[in-house]
Amino acid sequence: MVVTRFAPSPTGYLHIGGLRTALLSYLWARRNGGKFVLRIEDTDKSRNSEAAAEAIVEAFKWVGLEHDGDIVYQSQRDEIYAKYIKQLLDEGKAYKCYMSKDELTELRETQMANKERTRYDGRYRDFDGTPPEGIEPVIRIKAPLCGEIVIDDGIKGRVSFQAEDILDDFIIARGDGSPTYNFVVAVDDALMGINEVIRGDDHLSNTPKQMVVYEALGFELPKFYHVPMIHNASGKKLSKRDGATDVMAYKEMGYLPEALLNFLVRLGWSNGDQEIFSMDEMMELFDPSNINKSASIYNVDKLDWLNGHYIKNSSNAKLAALLKEYGVDVEGHDKKEFLLDALKERAKNMKELAEMIPTILNAPESYDEKAVKKAFKGDAIEVLKAFVAKLESTTELHLPSDFHAAMEALVAEMEIGFGKIGMPLRVALLGAMGGPGMDSVMAVLGKDETIKRINHAVDVLS
Ligand code: GLU
């Protein structure tokens, strides 16, 4: 069974790049009928906070990625790590190192002066003397000091490192006994049965160290997939300046989670030229070994396009419910169907949709000067008056098509073009140019309100 995981460190919020690797891990587990687990890597008490862990869980809920089983918090697993550290010490695969800070600094400085790689020199590796006093030893693992370490990466292929270039006997527990990052990641991945690790390639350099831990503890290695980073248009790692990096900011900006997930799955992965993927399709088609080897480019226009697509294809009931989160309640409006039908075609995001609604439901407080100049040339006032008469004499006026028929009848009778009524009508009803089709607007307002707004404009503008 495929077991994948997402293992964020709660240092702030759920990063968009993190959500992407979470999604890929989730899809791969689901495609294989496997498990996807969530582990919060909160051992670094100085950088992690509970609020940040909660923010990550909240973002997960928003996008709807369901993890299997309970969330695992590394901060609650000290005993487990201590047990494995002891085991390594007992087996002679790890040892206590009593080097003082000063000694460590001195070693570094000498190595730098000699233009050598700074590394621990193994001075306590085989130490059996009397330890110096007053030093809480760190625990170091015995790492291979030469030879090749090879990752058979599912995306990058064979990646090899020379042990002497990257490893030394690195610390697995600090002086206060707290375990270090690479140690706990490896222990947890192994104990949680994670057999496919899909994560950002910024972690590639950690992998050899984690492999040393696996080896020392006799755990079976998972399959690794190191996913290339998301870049901006100029080829640099995505930063806040290029677009929001906090997943919840996307919610605030009015993106739907399905659009965001669709956007993310396409970063560096494709299925022919398909752009739209439902969750079911993603789960059916996604395969991490087809991820591009090179970085993917963040393109917000694509995200906007996808978001527009998903808004347009959402039911009105769903949109009405979502709109409440953006400060607009249309649930009780008897014409909400017409309203949302008309607007969802045009909105790029939920915020925009929410902003459009009052511009229709509230009568204009003033009329845009430029629009008036353009629309109220010639006999616009007469045309509007004639239209009011037409509406008053029409009994069946409910659907957008009823209002459309009334407009058609008017232009035929007056022998004028559609623009002659369309433009002044738009200004009369909405106060400005732009916005959805007049038929829908009138259907939303209803006959009485439509007539009232036109009469008011006629009064003010004639
Ligand atoms: N906790 C790490 C991070 O947030 C991820 C660890 C991993 O995926 O192996 O960057």
Image: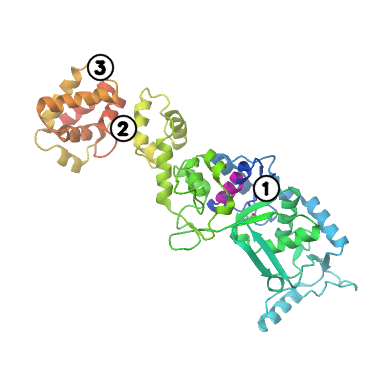
Q: Residue at x 50, y 39 (%)?
A: 278
Q: Which mark is residue 396?
A: 3
Between discs 3 and 1, the one toward the N terminus: 1
Task: Tell me the residue that label 1 is attached to.
Answer: 39
In the rendered structure, which amino acid carries the disc numbered 3?
Answer: Glu
Q: Is residue 14 visible?
A: no
Q: Is mark 1 within 8 Å of ligand 1?
A: no
Tell me residue 146's x, y (percent).
Answer: 74, 73
In the rendered structure, which amino acid carries the disc numbered 1?
Answer: Arg
SS label for mark 2: helix
Looking at the picture, tell me which residue is in the foreground, 158 or 4: 158
Task: Tell me the residue that label 2 is attached to.
Answer: 360
Q: Residue furthest top?
A: 395
Tell me residue 414's x, y (percent).
Answer: 10, 27
User: Quadrant for ligand 1?
Assistant: bottom right
Say whether residue 24 is magenta.
yes
Magenta region, mostly helix, strand or loop? helix
Quadrant for the C terminus in the image: top left
Determine the CA span between mark 2 and mark 1. Answer: 47 Å
Say whether residue 26 is magenta.
yes
Q: Nearer the viewer, mark 3 or mark 2?
A: 3
Q: Is mark 3 within 8 Å of ligand 1?
A: no
Asked if residue 182 is positioned above or below residue 433 in the image, the reply reads below
Per the rendered image, the range of residues in magenta is: 19-27
Tell me residue 94's x, y (percent).
Answer: 82, 64
SS label for mark 3: loop
Q: Nearer the viewer, mark 2 or mark 1?
A: 1
Q: Residue at x 39, y 36 (%)?
A: 312
In the rendered structure, which amino acid carries the disc numbered 2?
Answer: Ile
Q: Is residue 362 visible?
A: yes
